Image (spheres, rainbow, N blue to C red):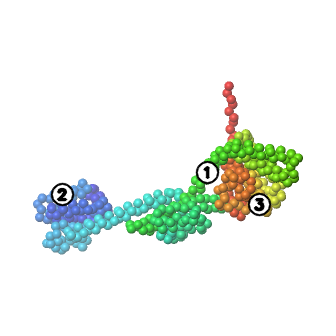
Amino acid sequence: MQYKKHIENKRYVIGVIGDIPALLSFWQVFKDQSNEQVLKEIGVVAAALPGESVLPQAYDEERAIPTYSGFRTMLEEHPEINMVIESTGRIGLIHELRNYLPPSVTLVERHAANFFINLLTSDKIWVAAKLDLLHTQNMLKTIIDQMNNEMLFLDYEGKIVDMNKAVLDRTGLPKKAIMGNHYCEVFSTSGDYECEGGTDAFEKTIETSQPADMLISHVDGEGRVKYFRVDTTPITDEDGTVSHVVAVRRDITRRRAMEHRLQQAEKLASIGELSTYMAHEIRNPLFSISGFANALMRSDGVDYKAREKLAIILDESRRLDEILKSLMNFTRPTGAQVTEVDLNELVSVTMSIMRLPCTNQSVDQVLNLDKDLAKVNANPDLIKQCLINVIKNSLEAMENGGTLIVSTIMDKEHVILTVEDTGEGIPLDLRDKIFSPFFSSKGKGSGLGLAQTRKIVDEIGGTVDLTSVEGSGTKVTFFLPPILAVAEEKKTE
């Protein structure tokens, strides 16, 4: 049973002929140079030792190999043998074997046997190396495909030679449709891109043979700005020549938003310190200036022209005082009482107030209010102020008329209030500055309206989002915290 299992599925069933030294030498070479794959295809079933009186047994896989005093006896006892290896190299024995062996049995002489073993071993080593290479390639491809960032492999001209799965998932295109295109056509959905400083990272890497990066931006179909960082890394030959480039695109929109919020927080802190200084150092002389101007206005010895100048001084003093008050109010926490607010009712009242300004500018009002809206946790006066600030900006963007749409709706976590206009939209280079203190695209006002709006919403745990498309309009969305259905705890005595 063990013998049958040994020769089962063997490609070569071998009988070896030779003296003891030659046989042992051949067998050692065979074992040393063969690998597991070779041994699976070869089975040595018997050995013949012509002229030997002592017939020691050889062993293969802990199985005794029978030995015989002559090759004829070996072949009679083992008709399954299909190959005979002659290991002595004796001319007379080889001639005798050629005349005796049937056509179904292959004779392999000593030198040919060595060549056969080396050839078979080399073939199996090549196959093993190929399998190992394929395994390594598959593992590397799996790792690259698991990356969330988009990765392109480029030739010296910037043409795509390969990519990871993230690129295919975003574009929705088959691999063949992307291969050979310039990398800009894939990394920019609009077909082109704008780099900060006008630097192309790929060209810089080709010129310097060093890694490079660039920032690109894109406005999606909803008018939202997305920022991407593209990093390029050279792949060099042995002589240091750049042959390929790896380009990786990362979405850094969230990081940019956090950086802007941090910059605004730092700016607000500086403004707070400055406003405190201004309140003490400017208001006292301002009070004196307005006081003396009032006194002169009441004096009988002042002529008409002088009164006109004094009136200008008083008006400018009042305007400067209002700026100081706005600045102090902006940097100071609101401290307003938070209560339950019916947002639909508040929107209806506010829009009735703004009906006349809308009519004067030929702006149509559209209200879409969700009747099943939850109440929000906020201060009604401050939310009204925020809504008015946004509506005023919308009206400024629709000087020649348009439509103002105010909507309320509920999602799983927030009560959502949106104000949408059909105005001129906001240029891309200004969108990051819209909520910054003292910024005004119209060149008038203090520039604190929208900054104050974001500050109020942030303080009650909400967020403000802005989307805009040039020439189509702007939409500002408030995400406000709803009142939760939590019973108040009873006070224990």
Dot 2 amino acid type: Gln
Compared across the picture, whether 351 is left or right of 32 comes to right
- First in residue order: circle 3 vs circle 1: 1
Q: Residue furthest front?
A: 301
Above or below: residue 240 compared with residue 448: below
> How packed is label 2: few (under 14 Cα within 10 Å), some, or many (20 or more)?
few
Residue indicated by mark 3: 398
For numbered disc 3, what is the local secondary structure? Answer: loop
Q: Are marks 3 and 1 in contact (CB under 8 Å)?
A: no
Q: Quadrant of the C terminus?
A: top right
At 55% from the left and 59% from the top, the residue drawn is 229
At 28% from the left and 68% from the top, the residue drawn is 119
Q: Position of residue 20 (x, y in %)?
A: 15, 61
Above or below: residue 275 compared with residue 166: above
- First in residue order: circle 2 vs circle 3: 2
At 79% from the left and 50% from the top, the residue drawn is 313
Q: Nearer the viewer, residue 46 or 61?
A: 61
Q: Nearer the viewer, residue 176 or 215?
A: 215
Residue indicated by mark 2: 57
Q: Position of residue 9 (x, y in %)?
A: 32, 62
Q: Position of residue 232 (x, y in %)?
A: 50, 63
> How packed is label 3: few (under 14 Cα within 10 Å), some, or many (20 or more)?
many
Q: CA distance from mark 2 to mark 3?
A: 104 Å
Residue indicated by mark 1: 263
Dot 1 amino acid type: Gln
Q: CA distance from mark 2 to mark 1?
A: 87 Å
- First in residue order: circle 2 vs circle 1: 2
